Amino acid sequence: MKVKITLILISFLITILNAKNNDLIQNEYVKLTPQEAEFIKKTKINVITSKTWAPINMFDDDEKISGIAIDFWNLIKTRANLSTNTKISKDWNEVLDEIQTKQSDITLGTTFDMKKTNYALFSTPYISFPIAFATLFDKRFIPDGSFLEGMKVAVGENYSSFLVMKKLYPKINFVEVKNTEEALKLLSAREVDAVVDILPVIAHLISINGYANLKIAGTSRDNIEISFMIRKDYPELLKVINRHIALLTPEEKDHIIRKWLTVKFDKKFIDKSMMINISIVVLTLLLLYFYRQKNINKYNEQLEFLSNTDSLTGLKNRRKIYKILNAEIKNKKFSLILLDIDHFKTINDDFGHLVGDEILIKISSILKYNVNQNDIIGRWGGEEFLIICKNTQIHSAERLAIRLKNLIENEDFKVRKITASFGISEAKQNLHLKDILANADKALYKAKENGRNQIVLFN
């Protein structure tokens, strides 16, 4: 006989963190370009996924691959009419190797990593989870990752949670192991101080393995966003998948989350200490919910991808940038950087549009991870990008443009050297938005006229 224990608060918390603005208009279908339609018709997609990241991807009782990522993928591949083969890997490193060598085309659950953009593309996220901190039962509440600094923390080798935590908290003494299940064994044996992974994985493994001496002691303040990772020369697949991700409804996401955050136990494993542990998990999550209540609005503003996001690069599109500019114009305290990839037409002509798309994606990543925290980036159209530098005078914007120009110029794009030209303008009290945009465009034209790979300020 089995007793069904539903971790309601976990699914409730995650549902809130993945909440989406219901005012977003959802299309009933995705219209494909001729190139995308041809790609889907002719290409069989080779999927690779591991089985050791339950409940994201795992083997079920019938030895079939299943999990949260699998359900999202099945939904999208059915709607996109994709023909697929699926391979189950022994570990995450094999997955990365297969994507890099193009033996496989896509894997279903990972997070963006700049280092992997040399060989992979990343979809817009389809779900997000906080990182959970598992500790021994008698340890204190951990409000954020900084409280783990100086401790021995076990984590799956090359796992997304490890890459994120290592970047945010370099003073943690990480112990890399094969997977999170192995990490929890070390924790239960008191060989490490804590284990980190995303919340559903930690909760699932503690529950199904009956770790009465372990608990979830806290979670990170920020979420890990889960995406599909695609081989780099398949931008057409990326664009199709991104459009279908944008059409996922809150109800569909909630259904998948609730399905996989229901855990079954054999009755013989349910004892007093086990029930106490489950109660601690639930109470901890309840505390976390109230602790995070003030931040709910931030999550409700996410993921309006269809109307506001460029499907190729994941940046804001021209429409969204216009909305932001119309709000910023009231303050008149910003500068604009308009940049254009030099000789982009000849790149498409010489190497094809797929290579051109890869270059656009690479440059968008360079911009995304090197602008200032409050700056806003968008794809303005074609090979043009626009950066809104809030509360920034023109010469400060120039310093940013110099850094970006050098990064692009020194990046290895494989096919040939790529450069960009920059035009910069500043909002003034007597100028309308159309004038500020026109000034940036004039400065960009002058930069190209001067020989390209230049920065020109509009005075």
Image: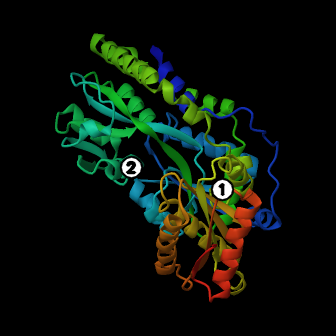
Q: Residues within 10 Å of mark 1 (few under 14, many from 20)?
A: few
At which x and y percent is residue 172?
24, 46
Q: Considering only vertical position in the picture, is 115 above or below 25?
A: below
160 or 344: which is nearer to us?
344
Quadrant housing residue 233: bottom right
Quadrant housing residue 133: top left
| Residue at image mark 1 | 84
Q: Looking at this rendering, what residue extends furthest in the bottom direction?
A: 451
Q: Is residue 28 visible?
A: yes
195 or 185: which is nearer to us?
195
164 or 82: which is nearer to us?
164
- Three-letter amino acid code of the residue under disc 1: Thr
| Residue at image mark 2 | 164
Identify which residue is drawn at 31% across, 32% down: 134
153 sits to left or right of 359: left
135 sits to left or right of 121: left
The span from disc 1 to disc 2 (Cα, nearest Å) is: 31 Å
Q: Residues within 10 Å of mark 2 (few under 14, many from 20)?
A: some
Q: Secondary structure at mark 1?
A: strand
- Three-letter amino acid code of the residue under disc 2: Val
